[in-house]
Structures are given as structure tokens and as C-alpha cells.
Amino acid sequence: MKENTKILIASITGITAGITGYMLYNKFRYPPLKVCNKVDLQRYSGQWYEIARLPNRFENDCFNSKASYSFNPDGSIKIINSCHDEKGKTKFIEGTAFVSDKETNARLKVRFSWPFSGDYNILKVGKNYDYALVGTESRENLWILSRNEFLDMNIVEELLEVAEQQGFNTRRLILRK
């Protein structure tokens, strides 16, 4: 076997082990998130405005973010996320979500780039599906979403309390401007 091939194989093995180790570390670092008892995904579908988020690399330099959820013919969920950059240009990314907990419909796997996927957990949703709190098991990603561009601060504070009780660092939240 050529030396370059051995180095490539060793590199891929190391990267894979590192990613696996990081995922396992986060999996056992926190207890599983408490999610909604039952989510009606038909009611959850539609457009959502991002009210607040924890900083993440996917949304660097993004403002006025929105997410739109609809159903694909195969039953998966089509996601279109959009935002404006600092020059006012609209950026889009499209992905797919799959329900990973059919009992509650509150745990999904989201994929924007094959083969990578992430978890999407609906922690709380308003009784009229007018707001939602969504986070990842790692507690690194958190979003407060609303059907309107603005959300009553009393509701925001209630959602922050739920997030803090589950281990999210809400002091780092970026609020919609």
C-alpha cells in the first residue's frame, strides 16, 4: 500500500473517531431533552420567524431569519431556511427532516447536506401553534420561533425559563432586531 494511501486512511479514521467521540460525549453529557408530548406536524408546518437563537455557524451574518416547513410526497418534511446578510441579500438553504420519534412527532432528524444530519427537538409549542421552542440534545443550538415577526416578551421569558431548566445557556441568545 502506498504511503499516501496509508496517511489518507489514518486521517479518515482519526476524523471519524473524533466526530464519534464528540457525539458520544454530548449524548451522555446531558439527560435527554424533555420534548412536547405530541406535535401535530400539519399544524406545525408553514412559515416561522426566528425570534432568538444561540449563535451557530450556519447563521453567521444572518438577520431576519425565517423557516418554512411543508410536506414532501414521501411524507418527509421540506425545510427552506432564509435570512438576509449584512448587505440585505437574501440567502436560502433547503433541507429535509424525518420524524425520529413517531410517538410524539417532537424529535426529528434534519439534513441539509448528505450524509450529515442533526437533531431537531420541539421542546414547547403554543396551544395555537403560534410559537415554538426548538433545541438540540447537545444544548448548543436553540431557537425561539413565532408565526409573527415579533413575540410577546412574557412568552419569550417563559420559553427562556424552559430552556434554562433543560441546560441551555440563554445568556448567549441573539434576539431578532
Image: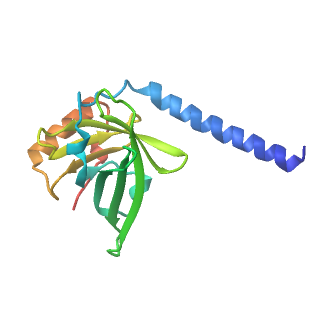
The residue lying toward the viewer, choosing from 47 and 30, is 47
Q: In this view, does 104 lie to the left or right of 31?
A: left
Q: Which of 108 and 9 is in front in this view?
A: 108
Between 5 and 22, the one lying in front of the other is 5
Extreme-right residue of the structure: 1
Q: Image quadrant of residue 19?
A: top right
Using residue 18 as the reference point, say whether residue 56 is left or right of it. Answer: left
Q: Which residue is drawn at 20% across and 44% down?
A: 43
Q: Residue furthest front?
A: 73
Q: In the image shown, does 130 or 9 lie closer to the viewer?
A: 130
Instruction: Return the x and y of residue 115 as percentages of the image width and height.
Output: 55, 46
Q: Which quadrant would residue 134 be assigned to in this image?
A: top left
Q: Is residue 60 visible?
A: no
Residue at x-position 14% and y-position 38%: 158
Q: How many marks?
A: 0
Q: Residue at x 90, y 47 (%)?
A: 2
The answer to whether residue 149 is seen in the rendering is yes
- Scheme of colours in the image: rainbow
In the image, what residue occupies the spot 25% across and 48% down? 45
Residue 66 % position (x, y): 28, 58
Residue 17 in percent (x, y) is at 64, 34
Quick one: quadrant of the C terminus?
bottom left
Q: Please state, as top left, top right, bottom left or bottom right, where the N terminus lies in the image.
A: top right
